[in-house]
Image (cartoon, helix red, strand yellow):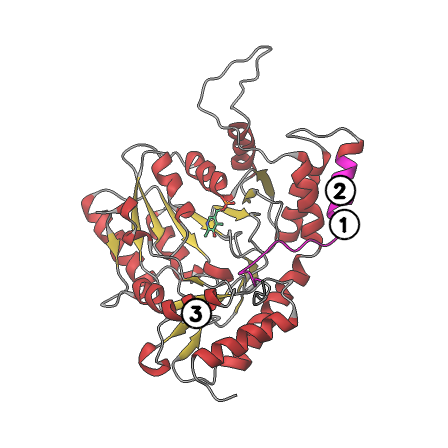
Amino acid sequence: MIRATKKEKIHLSTPHLSGSELEFVREAFDTNWVAPVGPHLEAFEREASNFLGVKEAVALNSGTSAIHLALALLGVKRGDTVFCSTLTFIASANPILYQGAEPVFIDSEPDTWNMSPAALKKALEDAGQKGKLPKAVIVVHLYGQSAKMDEILCLCNQYDIPVIEDAAESLGSRYKQKPSGTMGKLGIFSFNGNKIITTSGGGMLVSNDAEAIRKAKFLATQAKDPAPYYQHSCLGFNYRMSNVLAGIGRAQLKVLKERVSARRDIFSSYLRELSFIPGIEFMPELEGTFSNRWLTAMLLDEKQTGISSSTLMRLLAEANIEARPVWKPLHLQPLFEGTLFYSHEEMNVSEYLFRNGLCLPSGSNMKGENFMRVIQFIKKALKVKV
Ligand SMILES: *Cc1c(COP(=O)(O)O)cnc(C)c1O
């Protein structure tokens, strides 16, 4: 039987190893540090905090647990509210529910696709009037693009509300020279397999407040009291990263800069090849910021392109090319039905971005010929003369 050979699958984003990961892992094996603590773990935390220019870091088993610990550290409990960007992955907000608290979702604004300072201002004013200010604000830096941190921090400082930066997607990005994840009271990163660097699975919580990170380490390892037997006075978690995975992280951190420049090159190539097409627009990069361009995201105006983002995604899938919609806003998720949401002025920016946005294959190890296959396919689908 003769079958048409299916072309190689092009993924959205896959792990990109440097080759030196195994040396670190072997070292952990050779020294028998196959434990949830050990020298790689401490070194990974030190190297990451040096890279970020932040005082302290704690390596954890996921970005989600980093957000959960951040909320626990800030004393978020049942009945509290926490504000959160609406245009993000569910993991940004699930820990709010873990703590029994209630989220309030804040819309995006057009310049960054991230938290709208105007919507945040309105939400804070309303909450102030009701006497129910949030315990924390979770700001996401989507696809590597920084949110408008000056405006957001200024608003939150007025009300004395701590900011958690969800920098899961923005390791290596900068906002006015400041590394993403280091501007709020606490910052979190993810090393999941699809992120810009990976430990297969993992996360990190960082802060300039050394006491907060000391407490995070305590909570992340079952909150053991300093007693000669097992004694516990407060609720803890089992959230620490293992020493073996931290070894992978050390090798990955060494190539982060290269990974960022590869992703930025991919973005520039998409821009060069596709931005002339009427009705196509790319995620902006706010002046004074530097995005790691984790994923290249574009918008299609169906009236001009003649094809919707969802149709293009389906066609790409048929050609074995993986594209994904922009995150479905959390205020539209069935899980969060009935949750309070503040839109950006008279617009609903996040819903527009969700309906018209598409993330394109952006892996730093994507082959040039595969990149050209994506470009040619999109041009063909959009009936662009090439
Ligand atoms: C990936 C991601 C997370 C969660 O990280 P995990 O390590 O997968 O738990 C949180 N927030 C955002 C925005 C993410 O993209």
Which residue in the rendered view is the most extreme toward the front? 1
Sequence order check, earlier mark of 3 and 2: 2
In the rendered structure, which amino acid carries the disc numbered 2? Phe
The image shows residue 16 at horizontal and vertical percentages of 65, 56
- Of residue 375 and residue 239, the one placed in the foreground of this image is 375
Q: Are marks 3 and 1 in contact (CB under 8 Å)?
A: no
Q: Callout 1, which amino acid?
A: Ser
Q: Is mark 1 within 8 Å of ligand 1?
A: no
Query: Judging from the image, what secondary structure is the residue with disc 2 in?
Result: helix
What residue sits 32% from the left and 34% below the top? 100
Circles 2, 1 touching at the beta carbon (< 8 Å): yes
Which of these two is toward me, 256 or 206?
Answer: 256
| Mark 1 Cα-neighbour bin, 10 Å: few <14, some 14–19, many ≥20 | some
Where does residue 380 sit, x and y in percent of width and height? 47, 81
Which numbered disc covers residue 20? 1
Judged by its main secondary structure, the magenta piece is loop
Question: Callout 3: 10 Å neighbours few (<14), some, many (20+)?
Answer: some
**Crowd tier of the residue under label 2, counting other residues whose Cα lies within 10 Å: few below 14, some 14–19, many 20 or above:** many
CA gap between label 3 and label 1 equals 38 Å
- In which quadrant of the rendered view does residue 30 lie? top right
Q: Which residue is mark 3?
A: 315
Residue 65 among magenta residues: no
Task: Please name which of the two marks, 3 or 1, marks the residue nearer to the observer.
Answer: 3
Residue 27 on image: x %, y %: 79, 37
Residue indicated by mark 2: 24
Say if the magenta span includes residue 27: yes
Q: Residue at x 33, y 77 (%)?
A: 302
Q: Which residues are magenta?
A: 9-28
The front one of 224 and 20 is: 20
**Up-down: is 273 above or below 29?**
below
Could you tell me residue 367's position as x and y percent? Answer: 65, 68
In this view, 248 is above or below 118: above
